[in-house]
Image: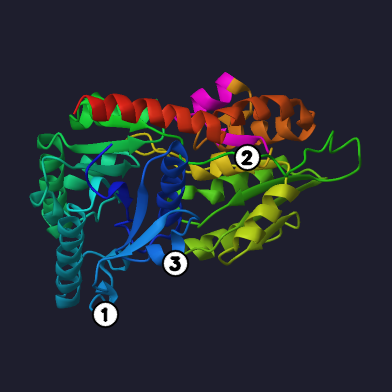
């Protein structure tokens, strides 16, 4: 494919988020399976989180963590010296990585496009190299560009440079996100690839045949880091209204850096004997066990200005569990097309209560074959073919 040593070199610029390294690692695995010459660059923590048999990890010769003591990605926007110093080092090091990798790879994947993504690297692009970013949601280049602080100004520059440089490409998880980046941001749709963000490796979970008839509780689960936008309080209020025996609701995940919302959840739970809270981060095994033990996974995040992917939706379905989700995209289309769960109107506690009630009395294993059918599009053979065909078309037309 190229005279350079590698077809693709990947690293993750959003270096504080472990899940993003998993996305980077998964993409590297799929590219390797297709047959490309692939490597991970040890720019930040790739040597720890991106390790795959048959894929090389290459060194660049500098460790930024000796300088970035207080990462910008952990701090609020402020005017402190440490904030600007950390940003400067992060920008400089990401640009340094691109300069080094330009000589090694025909295509470079920089990881997730977030509110904190560096901009300096876009001034060191080579015309014979493609640069890929993981486009999580279009509003990063819309809503977050409106302020006048350092981050907003950087994002405006990043948006401008991405639009103007046709060798900067995006990878997104569904057609809705692709359309929003094209129509709202102004990036040519021919520069955007759709790739599922997870791989389905088979279901180890199980569905109850009918919880009430078999004298076991119907088990509901909300899982993931708690934040105000998750609105778990609405779910608790709906369960209070439901007021039924034979149900159990588990809230799993720590409320990070928001003691006020943490207290709100605790106060809402007072007197609710059928609600359990696991107030800490979960290991991968604990996460899998909780999914396996539940009947329904409840999604309760508020809608954002643009569509985003939802990993918890896929994790639940890969475990064979139907979901109860708010009636907006990407949930509406997925649930209605495949009949893999129940929809409720976000913010409407009474509608959510009715949805929970329907879930209690519905024969749960009626979803089994629908979920299996849905998961087939995430099997490795399907994902490989989808990504390969789009890459061939995009890179041939370069």
Give the answer, above or below, for where 363 lies relative to 77.
above
Q: Residue 154, percent across and down?
A: 13, 53
Give the answer, above or below, for where 112 lies relative to 209.
below
Residue 334 within the segment the image draws in magenta: yes
In the drawing, does residue 130 fall left or right of residue 19? left
- Tell me which numbered mark, 2 or 1, is placed earlier along the sequence: 1
**Which residue was labeled with disc 1?**
66
Q: Residues within 10 Å of mark 2 (few under 14, many from 20)?
A: many
**Which residue was labeled with disc 2?**
318
Q: CA distance from mark 2 to mark 1?
A: 39 Å
Camera sees residue 299: no
Residue 295 within the segment the image draws in magenta: no
Numbered circles on residues, count: 3
Q: CA distance from mark 3 to mark 2?
A: 25 Å
Magenta segment boundaries in residue numbering: 321-337
Quadrant of residue 250 in the image?
bottom right
Tag shown at residue 48? 3
Q: Residues within 10 Å of mark 1 (few under 14, many from 20)?
A: few
Q: Residue 275, percent across and down?
A: 70, 55
Residue placed at 47% from the left, 61% from the top? 261
Quadrant of residue 7 in the image?
top left
Q: Quadrant of the C terminus?
A: top left
Q: Quadrant of the N terminus?
A: top left
Of circles 3 and 2, the one toward us is 3
Helix, strand or loop at mark 2: helix
């Amino acid at each position: 494919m190229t005279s350079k040593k590698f077809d693709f070199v990947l690293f993750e610029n959003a270096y504080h988020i472990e899940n993003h390294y998993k996305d980077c690692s998964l993409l590297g695995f799929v590219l390797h399976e297709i047959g490309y010459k692939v490597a991970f660059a040890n720019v930040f923590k790739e040597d720890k989180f991106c390790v795959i048999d048959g894929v090389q990890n290459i060194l660049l010769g500098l460790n930024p963590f000796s300088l970035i003591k207080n990462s910008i990605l952990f701090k609020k926007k402020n005017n402190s010296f440490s904030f600007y110093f950390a940003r400067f080092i992060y920008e400089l090091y990401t640009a340094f990585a691109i300069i080094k990798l330009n000589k090694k790879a025909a295509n470079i994947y920089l990881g997730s496009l977030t509110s904190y993504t560096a901009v300096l690297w876009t001034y060191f692009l080579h015309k014979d190299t493609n640069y890929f970013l993981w486009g999580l949601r279009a509003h990063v280049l819309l809503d977050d560009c409106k302020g006048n602080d350092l981050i907003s100004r950087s994002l405006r520059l990043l948006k401008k440079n991405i639009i103007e440089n046709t060798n900067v490409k995006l990878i997104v998880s569904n057609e809705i996100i692709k359309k929003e980046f094209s129509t709202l941001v102004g990036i040519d749709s021919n520069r955007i690839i759709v790739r599922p963000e997870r791989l389905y490796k088979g279901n180890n979970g199980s569905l109850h045949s009918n919880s009430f008839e078999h004298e076991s509780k119907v088990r509901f689960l909300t899982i993931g880091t708690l934040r105000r936008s998750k609105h778990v309080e609405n779910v608790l209020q709906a369960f209070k209204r439901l007021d039924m025996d034979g149900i159990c609701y588990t809230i799993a995940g720590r409320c990070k850096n928001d003691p006020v919302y943490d207290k709100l959840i605790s106060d809402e739970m007072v007197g609710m004997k059928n609600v359990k809270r696991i107030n800490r981060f979960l290991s991968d095994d604990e996460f899998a066990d909780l999914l396996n033990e539940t009947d329904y996974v409840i999604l309760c995040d508020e809608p954002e200005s643009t569509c985003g992917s939802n990993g918890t939706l896929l994790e639940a379905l890969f475990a064979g569990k139907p979901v109860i989700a708010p009636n907006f995209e990407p949930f509406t289309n997925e649930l209605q097309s495949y009949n893999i769960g129940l929809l409720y109107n976000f913010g409407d506690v009474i509608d959510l209560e009715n949805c929970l009630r329907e879930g209690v009395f519905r024969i749960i294993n009626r979803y089994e074959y629908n979920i299996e059918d849905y998961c087939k599009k995430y099997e490795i053979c399907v994902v490989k073919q989808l990504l390969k065909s789009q890459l061939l078309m995009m890179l041939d037309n370069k």
